[in-house]
Image (spheres, rainbow, N blue to C red):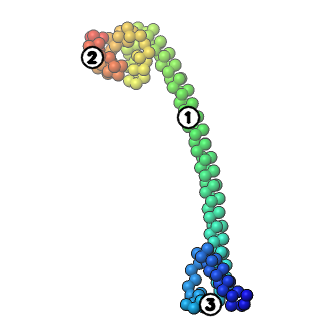
Amino acid sequence: MNQNGKNQWLIMGLSGLVGLFGLHVSGWAGDEGKVSQDPLHLLESIEKRRTQLDEQAKKLEIREQDLKRLEERLASRIEAMEKLRDTIRGDLEKEKQSDDSNITRLGKIYSSMKPNAAAEGLKALDQETAVKVLKVMPEKVVAKILNKMDVLSAGKLADELGMPIADKRRRVE
């Protein structure tokens, strides 16, 4: 093969590489198939493009590593928050059980009191607590206590207890 044929093969091989790497080099082959650009310049362009691609690959690798670290931190934070949520739920459940047992205990105490004293004691509590206490007490005892209260206080408590109006009038009067 003569020198001209070798150059033709080199040019064809380089043009394939140019297409492969997406290089845009204009004017490297003329109308008559003559080389109008130096193959050395073409190789330099390919090397420059390869260097750019290597730099982009390094940047992408660094970003990927950063994302992995962020994902790990986020997973750690999520895990910590879930543990905290579970702890809070457990604490709230314990608090609710404690409140329920205290309400039940208060219900027993007020049930054992005379209706006048129980009525005065319940009026001293906030309405929400008084309603909770009345709900755990037997209805007959609640009726006696409401009967000893003033009409306004008894009506508010009866509303909160969900008693029908006719029952409220009968018990309050």
For mark 2, give the secondary structure: helix
What crowding class fits label 3: few (fewer than 14 Cα within 10 Å), some (14-19), or many (20 or more)? some
Residues 54 and 12: in front is 12
- Looking at the image, which residue sits at the far right? 1
Q: Earlier in the sequence, mark 2 or mark 1?
A: 1
Is label 2 or label 3 in front? 3
Taking the image as shown, residue 59 lies to the left or right of residue 149, namely right
Residue at 55 percent across and 34 percent down: it is 88
Residue 104: image location, x then y, percent = 48, 16
Residue at 61 percent across and 74 percent down: it is 20
Is label 3 or label 1 in front? 3
C-alpha span from label 2 to label 1:
41 Å
Residue at 54 percent across and 28 percent down: it is 93
Q: Is residue 121 visible?
A: no
Height in image: 44 above or below 21? below
Say which amino acid is labelled 1. Ile
Q: Is residue 70 visible?
A: yes
- Which residue in the structure is indicated by mark 3? 35
What crowding class fits label 1: few (fewer than 14 Cα within 10 Å), some (14-19), or many (20 or more)? few
Is the residue under label 1 in contact with that under label 3 (CB below 8 Å)?
Answer: no
Q: Quadrant of the C terminus?
A: top left
Residues 34 and 94: in front is 34
- Which residue in the structure is indicated by mark 2? 165
- Which residue in the structure is indicated by mark 1? 88
Q: Earlier in the sequence, mark 3 or mark 1?
A: 3
